[in-house]
Amino acid sequence: MTRGNTAPMSARRRELARHLNGAPTREAPLVLPLSRGQRGLWLREQLIAGTLAYTETVAVDIDGPLDTAALRTAIGAVVRSQDSLRTAFVVGRSGPVQVVRPPAGVEVPLEEVPYPGSQDGPDDLLDTVVRDGLLVPFDLGRAPLLRTRLYRASDVRATLVLVVHHLVWDGGSMSVLLNGLADAYAAVSRRVPAPQAAGGPALSYADVVRTVRAREADAALRAAADHWAGRFDDVPAGGPPWSVPAEDRTPDRGGRRSGVIHREILPPVRQRLRAEAAAAGCTTFMMGIACLTAALRSGPAPSPVLVSAPMSVRPQEAARQIGYFTNTVPVVVTPPEGASRRVFLEEVRRSCVESWTHRHVPLEHLVTAARTRHTGTSPYESVLFNCFSSTEPVQDGTGPTWTARWLPSRGPRCDLMVSWDETDERILARFEYDVDLITADDAGRIADAVMGAAEHLASGTEVHYDELPRFAMRATASRPARDVPPPAGPTAVDVPARIRQAAEHVWREILGIEETDPLDDLDDFFALGGRSLEAVRIATRLSTSLERRVPPRMVAEAESFGEFLTLVAATEREKAE
């Protein structure tokens, strides 16, 4: 059934409509599969309770006279034209699906409030957004995954804050939104038809999703997956200098917050860095990877360093689409022993080209394929590097000027995320770190090492790789105290029979365990072949059969089937009390 079809809705469509908390309409919701990258994000959300790691915050500064009513209408026009902004994510019979609600069934309220204090700094604005309650976890099953608030500073200055989930948004969506919003506002203000760009993309979101899915299923993707199969074997299992052993890591980042450090690469250094990059055949992104991997190396070459980086998989046909068309891809840099500056940059360039060539396999898929036990984080996903150029301001000559900027993440999606925002004159560097793993002092020294490496690489002098600045944990430094709850709850023998029977039935069915094969209390979910998706399926099925919420993270975090049973039984006891 296509959108606009007036045939009776199937029972399945009605069920999905109820999931979306909206009454079925004559225009049925459109059900689509998730891309591999989306599935990875969705699974993380299920495993990390209350996380804000994938909640993006964008500030659009508006300079010039602004009609709030016209802005409200313009936002509605953009939401109607962009299917992704009307999309929710629910669990179908074979796993998660994305459901696009009809335009008539989605509204995005816009409230106008005074701008408190000055407009000086992203952190101040972010604190205001937090106090106003905009930065709370989304219910992925309810569209839209978008919140708005207008902060009015004066008659001619205001800031529109957009809080949007990463599942329906990526870096390439910023310019699409900004241009669409400005065009729609101009059309509303002047009472003229909006241009085609504001009216939405020529190719439908469904067609783009199908294009991405088809590309993920072709032989090139399988070849890319085979290419990466053994690459992780070269990376030290210890991870970055601050790494916590796998058995000691706390997977739940849900209640954590990010620390933020801002630095700048000033115009003279920026110009020299650009010139040195061009001479080495590198881009600014590659120079950023060089600075970060040099700063985080564990020792002299040839010790490999792995960071991850988001890379676009956006089809050309999706140029005017808002959506998530990105994969996080590993970049493994292994300079040869005694590498000179030139040889080091050649290795960085080779590694980045390798990652770009094989970018259609997202890191989440590779980590799962590597059969690494992880419930939301792993040593392979500790460090993320993101490089982008600020979206150009939009101004049509008669209306206001629209300038967009990213605000720091409120919740950590990894241990350390380094972002380089490249402007014409300088590079704005931002270091966001998990305060439960990295102290503010260590974060500052990491930033110093990265900035120092940039200075050295921009100098043009022949410095060896092993001489570049490097971060190392101080011998006297200690990580912040981590609260590890003591074991609690009944032992496996105290589990009610109906819970044990229901759980055993679901585990056998989802994990493919024959009735003739034993399922022991000591059996491990991952050793039985379980992965993130199976954890979600088990939790969903048990939540239905036991009539209480069983979170997927309970399946993944339990060390054994018996421990899982005790956790489920403990929830029943808490409910009774």
Image (tube, rainbow, N blue to C red):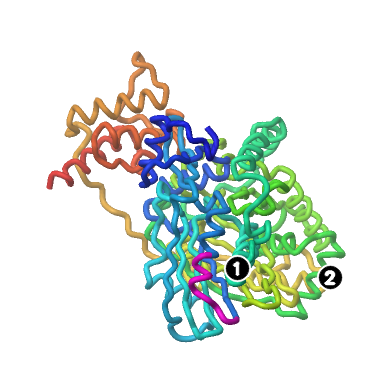
Element type where label 1 sits in the image: loop
Quadrant of residue 517 in the image? top left
Which of the two residues, 114 or 376, is positioned nearer the viewer here? Answer: 114
Could you tell me which secondary element the residue under label 2 belongs to? helix
Residue drawn at point x = 35 percent, y = 27 percent: 507
The question of residue 72 being in magenta is answered with yes
Residue at the extreme left of the image, as rendered:
577
The three-letter amino acid code for the residue at tag 2 is Ala
Question: Relative to 486, does residue 549 appear above or below in the rendering?
Answer: above
Instruction: Name the residue at 58% across, 72% down.
Output: 189
Which residue matches tag 2?
Answer: 275
Specify start and end residues of the magenta stretch as a single range.
Answer: 64-73
Place of residue 40 in the rendered image (x, y in percent of width and height, measured from the top left): 52, 44
Specify the amino acid type for callout 1: Arg
Q: Residue furthest top?
A: 516
User: Exactly how many numbered labels are in the figure?
Assistant: 2
Q: Nearer the viewer, residue 63 or 442?
A: 63
Give the main secondary structure of the magenta stretch: helix
Please determine whether, in this image, residue 403 is positioned above or below residue 239: below
In the foreground, 209 or 489: 209
Up-down: is 444 above or below 247?
Answer: below
